[in-house]
Image (cartoon, rainbow, N blue to C red):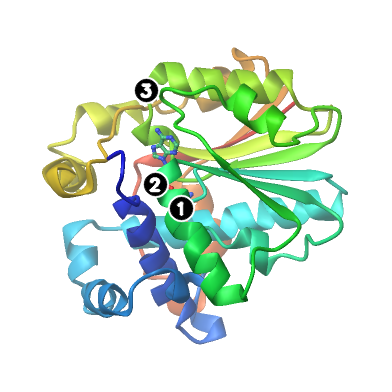
């Protein structure tokens, strides 16, 4: 991504969340009451119109369904880990993720938001505007995953490897180098107490290689000149669990489009597609 520019994809995802969250409760897959406040009003209205009118679905069939279901699935994973008593939450490549503010973590779960310096500076300004101040339970850590050491930055910010932690890494791995992905997973395995875990989505390598056939991947390539964020990393379909076990995780679960569709798309959402190009991995330490 560009050095001094807020992540454009982070804004796009926040807009998709905001549009989903504006639907009545029975019609929405996920709910993020803050998403809209993290994006400029004009952007919400323009891009929101593309989503609501069905144009976005035409350009990238099933992408919005996947974004909503990914948010919901990771929310459900987080709820489970909070109930199990995790002590730390680390949101990697946080963008405008609002889980640190919409889950009841204060006083119980020390939370770290890790992001590229440019996006994080913008997020902090918005957090102050929305909530009046920066919440005491959240520590903000600026890191470029591709060039800086997550270990140095997170440990010096007060992350405690002896505590149980959940790492959320949503919508980030596909923009990194394979070396940066491995370094991040290695940090998690080596610096997390038993009972810790990471949940993250990834692109199927086949989709990366066949960008012409996977429409939304082709679109991302086409608009790279605007976003500065290119898709660079993928894991071959069907090998996600083995990928994590080979990197030292003790157990892994790989969720695909069909799993998400079966779990969340009922009633008024039964018709919606979920793009078949991504998996979501849960790796346990
Ligand atoms: C698609 S956005 C996802 C944001 C957020 N996780 C969400 O799901 O709403 C990608 C995020 O990864 C971050 N990112 C991309 N490349 C990065 C890098 N090299 N180092 C640190 N963060 C990076 C961006 O700043 C952005 O916040």
Residue located beneath label 1 in the image: 121
Numbered badge on residue 177: 3
Asked whether mark 3 and ligand 1 are closer than 8 Å, the reply comes as no
Name the residue nearer the viewer: 107 or 241. Answer: 107
Q: SS at mark 1?
A: helix
Asked whether mark 2 and ligand 1 are closer than 8 Å, the reply comes as yes
Residue 228 percent coordinates (x, y):
22, 41
CA gap between label 3 and label 2 equals 19 Å
Numbered badge on residue 87: none
Q: Nearer the viewer, mark 3 or mark 1?
A: 1
Sequence-wise first label, 3 or 2: 2
Q: SS at mark 2?
A: helix
The residue shown at (54%, 18%) is 183
CA gap between label 3 and label 1 equals 23 Å
Screen quadrant of the C terminus? top right
Residue located beneath label 2 in the image: 118
């Amino acid at each position: 991504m560009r050095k001094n520019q807020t992540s454009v994809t982070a804004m796009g995802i926040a807009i998709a969340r905001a549009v989903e969250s504006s639907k009545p409760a029975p019609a929405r897959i996920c709910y993020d009451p803050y998403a809209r406040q993290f994006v400029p009003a004009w952007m919400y209205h323009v891009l929101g119109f593309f989503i609501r009118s069905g144009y976005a679905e035409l350009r990238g069939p099933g992408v919005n369904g996947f974004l909503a279901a990914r948010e919901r699935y990771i929310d459900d994973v987080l709820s489970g880990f909070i109930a199990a008593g995790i002590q730390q939450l680390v949101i990697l490549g946080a963008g405008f993720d609002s889980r640190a503010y919409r889950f009841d973590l204060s006083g119980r779960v020390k939370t770290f938001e890790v992001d590229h310096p440019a996006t994080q500076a913008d997020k902090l300004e918005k957090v102050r505007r929305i909530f009046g101040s920066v919440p005491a339970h959240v520590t903000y850590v600026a890191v470029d995953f591709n060039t800086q050491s997550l270990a140095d930055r997170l440990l010096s910010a007060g992350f405690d490897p002896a505590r149980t932690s959940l790492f959320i890494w949503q919508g980030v791995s596909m923009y990194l180098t394979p070396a940066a992905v491995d370094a991040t997973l290695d940090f998690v395995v080596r610096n997390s107490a038993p009972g810790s875990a990471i949940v993250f989505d990834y692109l199927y390598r086949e989709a990366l290689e066949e960008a012409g056939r996977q429409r939304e991947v082709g679109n991302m390539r086409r608009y790279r000149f605007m976003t500065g964020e290119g898709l660079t990393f993928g894991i071959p379909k069907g090998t996600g669990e083995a990928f994590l076990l080979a990197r030292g995780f003790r157990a892994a679960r790989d969720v695909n489009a069909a799993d998400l569709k079966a779990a969340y798309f009922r009633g008024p959402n039964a018709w919606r597609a979920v793009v078949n190009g991504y998996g979501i991995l849960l790796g346990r330490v």
